[in-house]
Image (cartoon, rainbow, N blue to C red):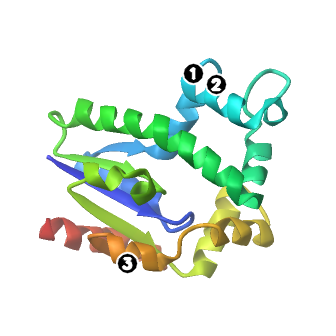
Amino acid sequence: MKVIGITGNSGSGKTTASKILEEKLSAYVIDADKVVKDMSQPGTEYFNAIKRVFGDNFFTDDGNINRKKLADEIYNQKDSLHRLNDLTFKYVKEEIENQISANKSENEYVVIDVPLLFEAGLDKSCDVVIAMVADDEKKIERIMERDGIDYATAKKRLDIQPDDDMYLEKADFIIDNSNDDELWQKLSEILQMI
């Protein structure tokens, strides 16, 4: 059994790569964004921690997290981004590690799709880390399409993320995913090596 970490900036194609591995290899995929969403439901420890740190202003009248308002805050205030990341690492890392353990024996491949894999220390749970990189303009285009936002907002979100150089330095393998058509071929070559 291999644990494959997939990381990279927003718009680099992490989720697409994970879905391909799920389809082609029947890999069990742990999507960190989905884990965060599930763990941020009202009443959870993570939800309560967000409320303590950020206050009632970031919650809707029906008691849910106002995701748009929180996103605007973290993309415009580095201190807020660091505070949210600290909470996320604390609660979500443990859940992802639990899911890896629970699925190790039943699956040949477990894929974890984590934007902040290195920052959270989850690279230590992986046998191999693949970093997805792409041209900034391509990433911005994908973010705009995925999130339904304008160019300036997408660029601002990308600008606060690590440079591709960090991934080049730390990952075991790099995939330039500026062209989606070649992604399975590139993943196949890496799988043959591991």
Mark 3 lies on residue = 168
Q: Amino acid at mark 2?
A: Asn
- Which comes before the other along the chain, label 1 or label 3? 1
Mark 1 lies on residue = 44
Mark 2 lies on residue = 48
What residue is rendered at 14% in x and 46% in y?
1
Q: Amino acid at mark 3?
A: Leu
Query: In this orientation, which residue lies closer to the viewer: 138 or 20?
Result: 138
Q: Residues within 10 Å of mark 3 (few under 14, many from 20)?
A: some
- Which comes before the other along the chain, label 3 or label 2? 2
Is residue 42 visible in the rendered image? The answer is yes
State which mark lies toward you, 3 or 2: 2
Residue 164 lies, in percent from the top left, at: 48, 77
Q: Residue furthest top?
A: 43
State which mark lies toward you, 2 or 1: 2
Query: In this orientation, which residue lies closer to the viewer: 108 or 113?
Result: 113
**Taking 84 as reference, is 19 left or right?**
left
SS at mark 1? loop
Residue 40 lies, in percent from the top left, at: 60, 30
Q: Which quadrant of the figure has residue 168?
A: bottom left
**Taking 73 as reference, is 32 left or right?**
left
What residue is rendered at 32% in x and 32% in y?
98
